[in-house]
Amino acid sequence: MITIKQTKEINSGLKVELVNSFEQLDKYADSWDLLALNAQRQHPVMSHAWITAYFRTMVKKDESWFCLFAFDNDDLVGVLPLLTKEYKLFWNKYLLLRTPNDAHTMAVDFLFKEKYGKKAIQLFADYLNNMRPKVIRLTMNQISYNSTTFGILAGGIHGIYSCYYPNKFVSIIPVEGSFQDYKKRLSKKLIGNLRRSGNSLKELGNFSVTAINDGSDARENLLSFAGIEKSGWKGKKGATIKYNFWSFFEELVHNMVKREWLEWYFLNVDNKRIAGYLTISFGRSAFIYKTGYDEEYRSHSPGSVLTEKMIENIFSTGKYDVINFFTDYEWLLRWNVKQKPYYKLVIAFNNPLSFFSTRLRFTIYSRFPFVRRLKTFLSRFTLMLRGNKKNPR
């Protein structure tokens, strides 16, 4: 159990507050979302809307959550959402911290007003160093390539040691010039395939693309999208949002609609939806979050046709600087995306156990890539052996 006081003044001139109830979180909803929208690195996962959806539905049984807020007088200038797991060693208890992260949530980072960046991170570092039980480490998976946190940490934060290294990639399309300019950069093979797919869809009946951004029928649209997704390989593997993440997506969609950030794209043939995109409009970025198509129409490439129409629409609005696909699926390469790295960031704290279990270990990982590759290989090999033992021939 965390025993540190709920609020504390630290020499930075800022005040830090620990919040661990939804009632308290919701009190700061508007100022938190405004902070995320105005941040240099705009990303919807950093918003109150996203983090509360995660906290309500995705926290593991052996974890609890809390959130740190930094204030300059009454002005919210920093946020750090955290999950904590208690770890026992001999007679002592320690805490392992992480930011929200899973297959559908990534890039959760320190959030702050830019001029308060160093002060806010130092404030949170001092606070966490004073927690009881002591903190062993804080892990942040898949921090975005354009995060300003790395530069601040490189300048030095008292009481913590940080290291980071590449961990997967994200695919983006800069929205520069017109859609026709962008289309000229696509391969002739893809252009030809898109033309043939469009013609084959016309032969099936009246086909159209619907863009929905007014929040109407949000739950019905989510159910419709889930049905499309279930028809494909994800349904066969039990990896759809309907199987494993329905509560999270219901909460997230509800929150996104309230803020007018949610957009849907559907490809229809004779009023039947055969492909869909769930997207999020956040600041100057269009985030392409989830996609699916009806397996019955696979030979007509409905997903590719819808992707072209969606990108064309995004270019035409003039609202965006970048299209962010959240991930780095191989099929995205044909769309002339730029791949940017996600990073794993690990922070060690000012105590002996943290030094030996975190600082030394992750310094090796960050400086010697072959050690990371070896660790990954051994982890996969161990999982394979376990699978063979459970399913002997």
Image (spheres, helix red, strand yellow):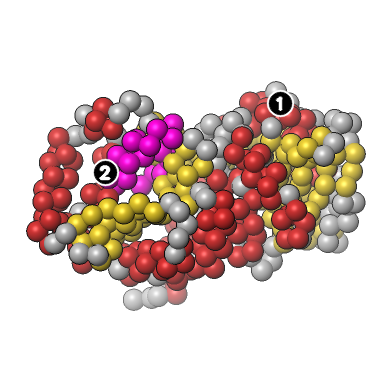
- Establish if 156 lies above or below 69: above
Residue 184 place in picture, x, y as percent = 21, 29
What residue span does the magenta drawing correspond to? 307-330
Instruction: Report helix, strand or loop for mark 1.
Output: helix
Left or right: residue 303 versus residue 159 is left
Question: Residue, x 24% and y 49% (percent of image)?
Answer: 304
- In the picture, the disc for residue 159 is none
Q: Amino acid at mark 1?
A: Lys
Crowding near pointer 2: few (<14 within 10 Å), some, many (20+)?
some
Q: Quadrant of residue 70?
A: top right
Q: Amino acid at mark 2?
A: Glu
Left or right: residue 178 versus residue 390 is left
Mark 2 to mark 1 CA distance (whole Å): 39 Å
| Residue designated by label 2 | 308
Residue 42 place in picture, x, y as percent = 55, 37
Residue 262 place in picture, x, y as percent = 47, 52
Residue 207 in view in this figure: yes
Residue 189 place in picture, x, y as percent = 14, 39
* Foreground of the two, 375 or 54: 54
Instruction: Report helix, strand or loop for mark 2.
Output: helix
Residue 362 located within the stretch drawn in magenta? no
Question: Residue, x 75% and y 53% (percent of image)?
Answer: 27
Crowding near pointer 1: few (<14 within 10 Å), some, many (20+)?
few
Question: Residue, x 29% and y 58% (percent of image)?
Answer: 275
Assign the C terminus to one quadrant of the image.
Answer: bottom left
Residue 311 located within the stretch drawn in magenta? yes
Q: Residue furthest toward the top?
A: 155
Assign the N terminus to one quadrant of the image.
Answer: bottom right
| Residue designated by label 1 | 115
Question: Residue, x 81% and y 50% (percent of image)?
Answer: 18
* Foreground of the two, 71 or 90: 71
